[in-house]
């Protein structure tokens, strides 16, 4: 279970602050723009039992968030609990207190992710930064000269992400070329690590290289969720586990046409389908009867077939095809 407590002082009366809080349509005014909040259904003013829903972008994917007000005491406090969200549990208590002509706003959040204690720790870092931004936004709404800044902990600079991808691929190649064949199990584990590195990091590096050649411009890398989560076959409890490395496109600065963007999109899945075959190819070239090599070859074939099925449906190939439907 994760818990977060924040306290901020706002230069306004309790009534005004509560009125702002009690209007769910104001959520998008105080949350970081990176989350692309879009209200789907909400009353103009909350009350006990009210239900409101919005769409948000989390880890690069869109999620529905639906909450219910479980307690409501004007103008002092109310609690909303998530009915549907990426979290297993989410309870947010808002409290307001008068203090020498200002308002002290306290927030206490309890949450639980589907990923257990480790997921709770990671989520705590993200939610804490969201709350810092949101509290600063409240102060700005009520007249303070302050510029809220959201520092995304999952954002990776373009040079750093590129170097990381290249180093990971080099490590994958080195591991494949130096497998300990005398130990079959260790060879399989080492080969699998090498395989994953080649599969995971070649995807976005191919996007970057082909994109830059075609005139597409990027601002940064980010850790997000794979497009696989858009498939309805993935249980909600597993969606947050399927992490991918993504690239943020700067469309306003890009000179590429539809063909250039399409080539950039398609380059990623092609790379992640072909590159992993390097690992079993190296192993089987040295020992054609290697169990590790045969297992990794089978894994590469499965990955090829799955990507050819999944990517045209919801992945990068799907994005490329959409460009020519407009």
Image (cartoon, grey):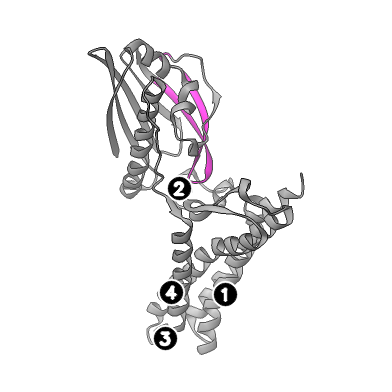
Choose between 4 and 80: the one closer to the eye. 4
| Dominant secondary-structure state across the stretch colored magenta | strand
Q: Quadrant of residue 16?
A: top left
State how far apart marks 2 and 1 are (Cα).
27 Å
In magenta stretch: residue 306: no
Q: Quadrant of residue 101?
A: top left
Comparing labels 1 and 4, the label whose residue is closer to the camera: 4
Choose between 266 and 115: the one closer to the eye. 266
State how far apart marks 3 and 4 are (Cα).
18 Å
Of pointers 1 and 4, the one earlier in the residue sequence: 4
Picture layout, residue 317 above or below residue 147: below
Q: Which quadrant is home to the N terminus? A: top left
Choose between 152 and 81: the one closer to the eye. 152
Tag 1 near tag 4, CB within 8 Å: no
State the mark number for residue 172: none
State the mark number for residue 277: 1
Q: Is residue 187 left or right of residue 269?
A: left
SS state under label 1: helix
- The residue segment tinted magenta is 47-69
Residue at image mark 3: 181
Tag 3 near tag 4, CB within 8 Å: no
Comparing labels 4 and 2, the label whose residue is closer to the camera: 4
Of pointers 2 and 3, the one earlier in the residue sequence: 3
Residue at image mark 4: 171
Which residue corresponds to the image point at 50% horizontal and 53% vertical from the top-left? 220
**Disc 4: CA contacts within 10 A as few (<14), some (14-19) or many (>=20):** some
Residue at image mark 2: 240
Comparing labels 1 and 3, the label whose residue is closer to the camera: 1
**Disc 2: CA contacts within 10 A as few (<14), some (14-19) or many (>=20):** many
Picture layout, residue 118 above or below residue 10: below
């Amino acid at each position: 279970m994760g818990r977060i407590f924040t306290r901020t002082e706002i230069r306004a009366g309790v009534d005004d602050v509560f009125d702002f809080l009690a209007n769910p349509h104001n959520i998008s005014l105080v949350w970081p723009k990176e989350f692309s909040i879009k209200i789907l259904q909400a009353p103009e003013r909350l009350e006990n039992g009210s239900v409101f829903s919005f769409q948000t972008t989390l880890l690069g994917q869109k999620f529905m968030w639906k909450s219910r007000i479980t307690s409501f005491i004007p103008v002092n406090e109310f609690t909303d609990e998530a009915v549907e969200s990426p979290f297993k549990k989410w309870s947010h208590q808002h409290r307001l207190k008068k203090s020498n002509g200002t308002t002290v706003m306290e927030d206490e959040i309890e949450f639980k992710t589907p990923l257990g204690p480790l997921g709770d720790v990671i989520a705590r870092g993200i939610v804490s930064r969201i709350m810092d931004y949101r509290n600063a936004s409240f102060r700005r709404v009520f007249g303070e000269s302050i510029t809220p800044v959201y520092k995304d902990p999952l954002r990776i600079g373009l040079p750093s992400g590129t170097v990381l991808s290249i180093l990971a691929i080099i490590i994958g190649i080195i591991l494949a070329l130096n497998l300990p064949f005398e130990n079959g199990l260790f060879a399989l584990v080492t080969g699998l690590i090498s395989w994953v590195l080649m599969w995971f990091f070649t995807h976005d590096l191919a996007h970057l290289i082909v994109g830059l050649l075609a005139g597409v411009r990027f601002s940064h890398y980010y850790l997000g969720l794979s497009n696989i989560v858009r498939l309805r076959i993935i249980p909600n409890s597993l969606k947050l586990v399927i992490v991918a490395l993504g690239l943020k496109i700067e469309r306003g600065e890009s000179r590429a046409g539809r063909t250039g963007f399409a080539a950039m999109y398609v380059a990623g899945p092609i790379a992640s389908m072909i590159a992993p075959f390097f690992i079993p190819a190296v192993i089987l070239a040295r020992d054609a009867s290697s169990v590790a090599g045969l297992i990794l070859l089978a894994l590469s074939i499965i990955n090829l077939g799955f990507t050819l099925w999944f990517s045209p449906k919801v992945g990068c190939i799907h994005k490329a095809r959409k460009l020519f439907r407009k």
